[in-house]
Image (spheres, rainbow, N blue to C red):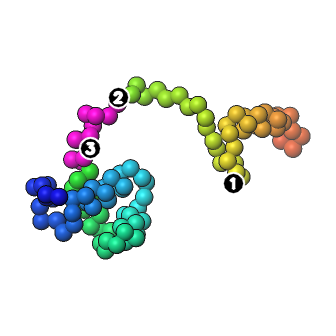
Amino acid sequence: MRKSKDFKWKHYEPEIILWGVRWYCRYAISYRNLKEMMEERGLEMSHTTLYCWVQQYAPEIDKRTRPYLKQSNDSYRVDETYVKVKGKWKYLASLRGMLRKQPRLEQTDSYPRYLI
């Protein structure tokens, strides 16, 4: 692979640099976790190296990919939603049904009437 001027004087290949930047931007992981992922692939580096790569290359990647992204109108519809309740994942519809079965706060005897 031919190195472009953007990657001139870099110790690692451009593909490796772009992997690190993409993984950091795409998945919410820390620099130290990303460093561990790179070490699992046989690459020794510091988390500060990854930080420098992200600071240098992420704005350029964003600028070059932005024209290809599909525009949205900030309105999203969710077909299925799961929520974690007491350590178990519940479908939102069943969660709503579970909440309706509970007595309302005003109907309980343990709640002081003067606060209602």
Could you say where residue 60 lies in the image, as x and y percent from the top left? 21, 47
* Horizontal side, residue 110 vs residue 94: left or right: right
The quadrant holding residue 15 is bottom left
Q: Quadrant of the C terminus?
A: top right
**42 versus 82 height, above or below:** below
Q: Secondary structure at mark 3?
A: helix
Say which residue label 3 marks: 62
Disc 3 residue type (three-letter): Asp
The quadrant holding residue 105 is top right
Sooner in the amino-acid sequence: mark 1 or mark 2: 2
Q: CA distance from mark 3 to mark 2?
A: 15 Å
The quadrant holding residue 51 is bottom left
Q: Secondary structure at mark 2?
A: loop
Spot the residue most to the right: 109
On the question of residue 114 being in view, the answer is: no
- Which residue is at 18% across, 69% downward? 11
Disc 2 residue type (three-letter): Gln
**Start-end of magenta stretch:** 59-70
Badge 3 crowding class, 10 Å Cα cut-off, few under 14, some 14 to 19, many 20 or more, is few
Disc assigned to residue 87: 1
Along the viewing direction, whichever of 62 and 4 lies nearer the viewer: 4
Disc assigned to residue 40: none
Badge 1 crowding class, 10 Å Cα cut-off, few under 14, some 14 to 19, many 20 or more, is few
**73 versus 39 height, above or below:** above
Q: CA distance from mark 1 to mark 3?
A: 37 Å
Say which residue label 2 marks: 71
